[in-house]
Image (tube, coloured by chain):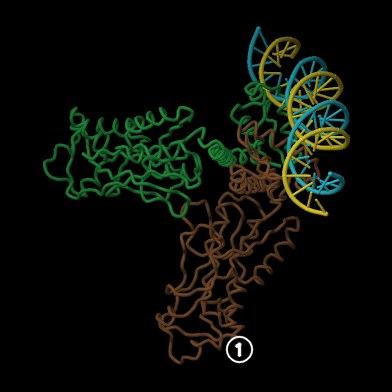
Chain colours: A green, B brown, C yellow, D cyan
Amino acid sequence: MISLELIRLLRHIRNAGTLSQAAAQSGKAASALTYQVDKYEDSLGITLLQPHGRTIRLTEAAMHICEMGADILNSVDSLEAQALAIGTGVEPRIRLAVDTWVSTDAVMSVISDFLAEYPQVELQIEHQALQGTWDALTTQRVDLIVGAIAPKPAGSGVQTLPLGKTERVLAISPDHYLAKRGALLTDEDLEAARWVVIKDSSSMSPKRDLLPTTPQSVILVDSLEAKLAAQIQGLGIGFLPPQVAKSMVLKGQLVEIKLDSRPPDIEMLLAWRTDSRGQGLIRLIDMFSTADLLPQH
Amino acid sequence: MISLELIRLLRHIRNAGTLSQAAAQSGKAASALTYQVDKYEDSLGITLLQPHGRTIRLTEAAMHICEMGADILNSVDSLEAQALAIGTGVEPRIRLAVDTWVSTDAVMSVISDFLAEYPQVELQIEHQALQGTWDALTTQRVDLIVGAIAPKPAGSGVQTLPLGKTERVLAISPDHYLAKRGALLTDEDLEAARWVVIKDSSSMSPKRDLLPTTPQSVILVDSLEAKLAAQIQGLGIGFLPPQVAKSMVLKGQLVEIKLDSRPPDIEMLLAWRTDSRGQGLIRLIDMFSTADLLPQH
DNA sequence: CATATTAATTCAAAAATTTTGAAGTAAATC
DNA sequence: GATTTACTTCAAAATTTTTGAATTAATATG
């Protein structure tokens, strides 16, 4: 009895706020929506909309359908793209999740080359941090991750290729008190300092921690840009990709700090679902894997 | 453009084999199905059915929709049950996956008590082995696992309660050559013997191995009943739940073998999805967790 | 406090979609 | 070569959905 139409209808009403606005936005009469909702209420035997003053409210059950239905709509979108890819050979759309740690310029350059070959493919790009990229892939919100952080989650129908390892440079504002020290910093120094950390965009992640210590004070940001800005302001210390750190060091906005124990490099991956079938994705994976996304200094 | 209706339609045609049989089974004219398929072919821009002799075949794209669509249909069923549970308080159906290792009698006894309280709830029971129970839960094919084997998969929106630990008894046919030895069996003896092993019903599992050694020869069976029969026949050796082994030992059909290193006990769990909301499931969990499913000898 | 306005519902008529069943075509079987 | 089976096409019939005017009720305005 629940259909994709019902999920879309309820989400649309929820987003619009009122029935009449939802009707106006979808170019229909308000009574058409009342009719549809009544039909589903009858067939399911539960109430979906309740009067609330002179407007309506979604019931708890309807809200649940909206929330859980989002995943279903994503899966259907994904299935449709796969079917089109099989039927026509080339998929109409590829969705990328790019880790914020990866240079956007390098990604854009690959995309530009790709679109020259496949102009009919629509590319959707979103940025995710850490575990969030894997989340987006396993829930089928995206088709390809650029810069996923190893290791890949177990047994999830995902294939990967290495993009290379990247060093992490501890860079801080020249005005920061730790920048004025002469000696190498110890773990105690790092633990006592305030860190600027990119927040994991995964909703429920088994807390992956890439820091050498567990700092007492952190500022969470949602992108590399925000992290850089925070560190330049001297709000805290943190690791940066070498190429980003270098250019800021040259401008005098940051200074690089040497540690007595060098943090391990991060291994970044290209990752996609084994059930992806389109020619375009195959070509895009090829292009990304031969591009130099993580320049070795 | 893909709808649940299309997924159901294609699966129905695939199962029926021919359009006319599909039409007859669904109580419609064959031309109605032609019309629907044409409509979807036009809107998607791909071919779904191809003539093959005087019948039709599903194209590769259509087969893909059938296969991947199965998960979507399960999710929608599940979502509907959840919505009904929220709307009415009691869900119309609860799907159980029972590990083959768990005593069916004990499960049935709990179910019987449950149905006395909630006669309107339809219970669906299936047996799964090992990782297969987790698969069934995470893909929303079932609502509750009885006898899942710890640990639960990471970060998957699943809640668990311990059912207890169960010992494993190495029991073999009295005619088996190892039964005639006097001494305790060593790892080498175990490795050289043929084992009867319950096949993991998970389609893609990160191969969980509960054996103390990697035997050279195994017979795979799909249930505890088949395993027991195979061991009684002397086809191989294997672990059994203590209560099962005991009763067969009393009948003289098996003998228990002591090992020099006792295998670790298996910890079994009750597991369900955090997003489950029905009163019935809550009561059923309560009943299972207080029942004595794994009798301590 | 009466009046205007906004939002949802009801209902009959109109529009759109889906189904039917008869006629036609092509492949397999007798 | 005739017959049967399976699908397609097409116009008519049935069903479903949408519309828009009338109605009810809650909030805002003068």
Kindly identify which residue carries mark 1.
B252
Q: Nearer the viewer, residue C7 or A20?
A: A20
Q: Residue furthest left?
A: A182
Q: Nearer the viewer, residue C23 or B134?
A: C23
Looking at the rendering, in which quadrant would you find the N terminus of chain B?
top right
Instruction: Please give the chain letter of the residue carrying mark 1.
Output: B
**Residue B43: image location, x then y, percent:** 64, 31
Which residue is depicted at the point 43% across and 85% down?
A: B185
Can you tell which quarter of the image residue C8 is in?
top right
Can you tell which quarter of the image residue B248 is in?
bottom right
**Side of C13 where B5 appears, left or right:** left
Crowding at dot 1, Cα within 10 Å, few <14 / some 14-19 / many 20+, comes out as: few
Query: Vertical placement of B50 versus B262: above or below?
Result: above
Query: Vertical placement of B227 versus A19: above or below?
Result: below
**Side of C14 where A113 appears, left or right:** left
**Side of C26 where B274 appears, left or right:** left
Q: What amino acid is at disc 1?
A: Gly
Can you tell which quarter of the image residue A227 is in?
top left
**Side of A163 where B143 appears, left or right:** right
**Residue C7: image location, x then y, percent:** 67, 23
**Residue B108: image location, x then y, percent:** 68, 68
> How many badges with numbers are in the image?
1
> Is residue A85 something that shows in the picture?
yes
Q: Regarding mark 1 in the picture, which secondary structure is present there?
A: loop
Looking at the rendering, in which quadrant would you find the C terminus of chain B?
bottom right
Q: Nearer the viewer, residue B217 or B137?
A: B217
**Residue B145: image location, x then y, percent:** 59, 60
Which residue is depicted at the point 50% across and 35% down?
A: A90
> Is residue B34 something that shows in the picture?
no
Which residue is depicted at the point 40% across and 83% down?
A: B186
